[in-house]
Image (cartoon, rainbow, N blue to C red):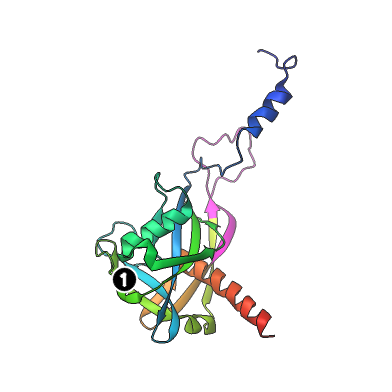
Amino acid sequence: MESYADKNICQQIKTMLGRREAVLDKNDGLWETAVLVPLVRHKGQVCVLFEVRSQKLAWQPGDICFPGGKRDKKDKTLRNTAIRETCEELGILSVDMEIYGELDYLVTQLGPILYPFLGIIHDFKQVKPNADEVGEVFLVPLDALLQQKPRRVHMQLANKASKDFPYDLLPEYPKEWNTRRGYDVYFYQYKKYVIWGMTARILYGFLERLRGEINKKNP
């Protein structure tokens, strides 16, 4: 085998790393999605808008979610993804909304890296949901969400090696399902709706952050 001892391999490594910033390794099938947590002023209250996914959709029909979706190659930024998807799903234009900022992003258990943005839709009357993607939309007053303590349960994750795992190299490695870690799942209820999953996780993070901000100003 050729030796690299006489070559300036360290300089080559340094040059290689200087060519670009580090990115997320997506070899495990990860992909990027962006969603918008949309605020709406309605009947004197600030509300959060939620979608019910159309029954026509193959993936998670009937689930409650925020507008959003997978990043397109044409999207220059994930902010553009959130705006584009919101416009497509709610039938509005980009000028009909204002993006306030970005919430903490999540690497989910199912694969997507989720980038949530928060903004406001200026006029709820402009919302005309795309029936192919959205079954209905509903509003929940922000006050009602802040006052609610969500139900919280813990989910466990486990892994199991495939048949070709090299047990000859690691004879002590477990052959059955091996529980490794877990994560919390949140549930919010409003009238007939149950908000849970990643939508509730994003909502929980936002509400906790907002609650802390409010308490800071009103000790």
Q: Residue at x 47, y 44 (%)?
A: 29
In this picture, is 21 found above or below 193? above
Drawn side of residue 83 relative to residue 62, left or right: right
Q: Residue at x 37, y 58 (%)?
A: 85
Near mark 1 (Cα within 10 A), the count class, few <14, some 14-19 or many ≥20, is: some
Residue 176: within the magenta? yes
Q: How many marks?
A: 1
Question: What main secondary structure does the magenta stretch of the protein show?
Answer: loop
Residue bearing mark 1: 127
Drawn side of residue 100 relative to residue 75, left or right: right
Q: Looking at this view, is 122 or 193 the one in front?
A: 122
In this picture, is 167 found above or below 149? above
Q: Position of residue 7 (x, y in %)?
A: 72, 16
Q: Position of residue 128 (x, y in %)?
A: 28, 69
Amino acid at dot 1: Val
Residue 107: within the magenta? no
Q: Is residue 110 visible?
A: no
Q: Position of residue 209 (x, y in %)?
A: 60, 72
Drawn side of residue 23 relative to residue 216, left or right: left
In this picture, is 146 found above or below 161? below
Q: Residue at x 59, y 46 (%)?
A: 174
Query: Can you name the residue that lies furthest to the front here?
Result: 95
Q: Is residue 17 visible?
A: yes
The magenta segment = 158-184
In this picture, is 18 found above or below 101? above
Q: Position of residue 176 (x, y in %)?
A: 54, 49
Q: Looking at this view, is 190 or 217 the one in front?
A: 217
- Which of the 4 quarters of the picture holds residue 219? bottom right
Query: Can you name the residue that lies furthest to the right here?
Result: 6
Q: Can you say which quadrant of the picture contains the N terminus?
A: top right
